[in-house]
Amino acid sequence: MRSNFRFLLCGAVFAIAFATARVPLTAGHTTELAQFGGAVLVGDGEVFAAESNNQFRPGLVYVFRKTGASWLEAMQLTAPKAAVGDGFGVSLALDGSTLFVGAGATAVHVFTKQGTAWTFASTVEATAVPMPTAAAPVEGATPAVPPVPNVARFGSAIAVSGEWLFVGKELPAGRGRGGAGAGGGGGRGGPAPAQPAGAVFAFKRAASGQYAYHSTLASAADAAAIASDRFGSAITFAGTTALIGASGQNAGAGVVHEFNLEADAWKVVRTFAPIGAQGTTAAFGSQVASNGSQAFVSAPGDAGGYGAVYVFAKVAQQGGRGGGAPAPQAASATPAATAQPVNVQWLEGTRLAAPTAGRADRFGTSIATSDREVWVGAPGAGGAGRVFVFTGGSTGFQIDGLRLLGPTWTDPIAAGASVSVRGNVAAVGATGANRNGGGLFIYERDSFGGWREQPMMTTPLDELPAITGIERKCGADGKIEVFDCGATDLQAFLPPSKLSHDGHTVPMSSLWGWTDSQTKQEWAILGRRDGTTFLDITNPTQPRVVADLPLTDGARPSSWREMKVYKDHAFIVSDSAGPHGIQIFDLARLRVMKPQPNGLPQKVAADFIYRDVNSVHDMVINEESGFGYPVGSSGGGNTCGGGLHMLDLKEPKNPKFVGCFADTETGRQRTGYIHDAQCVNYKGPDKRYKGREICIGSNETMLSLQDVTDKTKPRVISRAAYPKVGYTHQGWLTEDHKYFYLDDELDETGGMVEKTRTLIWDFTDLENPKLVKEHFSKEAASDHNQYVKGDLLYQSNYRAGLRVLSIKDPTNPKEIAYFDTDPFRPNTAGFNGAWNVFPFFKSGSIIISSVEQGLFIVKTSDRER
């Protein structure tokens, strides 16, 4: 029967075309990462579109209704105690005049419709669920997977039917993984531990209308099979049957669990997976939808990443189990009991796939069904994303004309990341539109049965407002606007939309400073993921954003962009960016440049691109010697093992390669990879090396001190290890070259230390550096970069922002000032907030790049301390 049913598939009917027109909404802002349209839902004459990931305002659900010929915003919904980072809108479900909205890791909020207004009614709290306890270990048994913790994402998926509300709870993808994510660390973490199994919580509506906890549903498979199973990643009802996806079960192959309601208890009947699933990482069960008689289950990883949606028919067959996988034991709030045979099963039939596909299409990311259609999102298809619409019914699906009309742009907008359809209206989320702010497409069926697209809707940017004009003093309450501060005053702040030639938003990366050798004007050189911005900050309360240098043609945007200055030229590199090379920009050009009339910077090009390296992590320059050292090179060109690629920069627009050097006893791969370095003409206490050119490499696993005076015979002076190494990241010498301050980027996230750690080295003997002190901050934030100016140490410590320490006593630093650039997160380990700081301007201005926020210009209140 399986083969006969499958043969009815021929392909997709058509892919929706995405034309664009900006429709401004009435209020609110969307951050570059907020992803408006991440969840969409079509109701009765209205469309709901959520943005749950806002960074600078609470999550929102927009309600759109048709007025005349246009769809317009009718209202906005927020959580009852709305707060930035509340995750409101992560999931949506509708039952008549009741709307359910998932909110982060803590709650599902319930709204009811009265007339034309949706009003808050109640909250289903995660705390209503009893915390599970792990069973005692049994000798010789497979170790149990930890119970899913309450920090997991409660409400990651929700479904409602009659008096029942099911709430999924799973760890977000990547929770518990090593590595530095978006920060300077990249993918340097260790292997990911097994995550706890997921769960679904059943709530039952009482006569009062409140939902009370009823039971917990989970997989009854053995512990090895359910580790990281993502049980509850998708939920749908089909009458008194609940289908629950576990897309991570069985090492990522995935299964669907079927539960039936029997005598007020939800009992598992069987699990099923497609017999023909292609690949062990199919992630079958990522999305589940049903029209009652059929179930549609996505497997975005099917066939090596091409993706598929499997269609199962609900048929009567005495005693059958169906679906290919044997039935497990029953699962409910009480210990499992053997399920009784039933005469209804889900029989695998059609496999839906895109007629032309690529491995990055993510076909099956979203599914929606109507009476005779199945809509399948593929947000990577065609570059911009597609939604494929298949027509058919209980007898299968057939080709009915194929139309693949792409959007009017080629930028990836992730169209099809979410989809919903009801009657003659459909909604499609495009989370990559509007520079990743997100977009919404609404479709209406015309009188001929065709779908007509309405103009794309976007929301204004979610970012903090610019602050310029006058100095803002740190108040007695330790605040400037929303920012925590101590002995630090704000001169100006500019968000991302003010820092690019076309006003788009993109996260920040590193920065450096330049003082014009002729005019003495002070300039900030600010890295973004997709380019570099040049700002005149001579008047620090009125910065002028003058020029925008995009990334090299053919390169790709990247989290890492670093730059240094030599002879009035900027040398700019980017890691994991493909064929980027070193952009060389003559800063003297800025003297006659002006911003565009709208205040945004003008677009400029590099003067020269050095092509003997491709991706480079950092650019190190010794201004005294005139030599530059791209380090951490990869992806082609002469990488020098990631070590020193030595360049003579005396003619800035004509750099000359003079050799490689790598300490192959260091680095995670023992190639001598250098993540960052400081190279100086040494003037410290070790007389053997006075006047020699020394590079101090932060080489992932330890420090490596290298003598590069003779470029034909560089050599290792010494290596310095230390306890609890996470990732040897970056450091800076005191001005007398006696002490060196080092940060380890991953010791905080790796749980090796509880507070921000700074390692203090005595370099009196370069051949035997001594770790003399581990200084711990009061904060727990990850540290990233630090620099010494006089007797002050300036640190950019991600979520804790700028930290200024007095090092008059070099081995006993004391924090004297701070400015927290990341106001809505706790000062915990992680990679948001302050990326880099530059404190070397003669005026005392300090510039800080903060990943999500933008550029800050500050001054400490007492610069003479």
Image: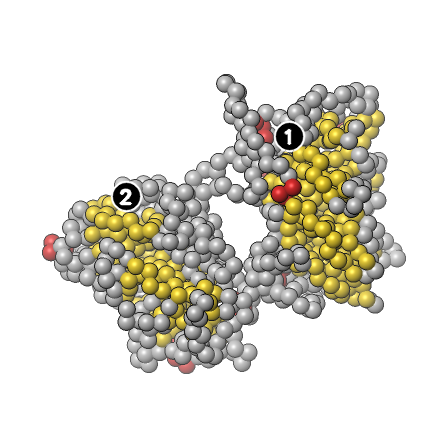
In the image, taking residue 286 as reference, residue 811 lies left or right, namely: left
Query: Residue at (43%, 46%) from the top-left corner?
Result: 749
The residue under the point 39% across, 69% down is 488
The x, y position of residue 62, in whole percent, is 71, 60
Residue 170 can be seen, yes or no: yes
Quadrant location of the C terminus in the rendered image: bottom left
Which disc is residue 722 wearing? 2
At label 2, the amino acid type is: Tyr
Residue 467: x %, y % from top left: 50, 73
Query: Considering depth in this image, is 732 or 527 the residue closer to the camera?
Result: 732
Q: Residue at x 72, y 45 (%)?
A: 367
User: Which of 840 and 423 lies nearest the eye of the viewer?
Assistant: 840
Q: Secondary structure at mark 2?
A: loop
For disc 1, the marked residue is: 219
Judge left or right: residue 455 versus residue 768. Answer: right
Q: Amino acid at mark 1?
A: Ser
Mark 1 is surrounded, within 10 Å at the Cα level, by few (under 14), some (14 to 19) or many (20 or more) other residues, namely: many
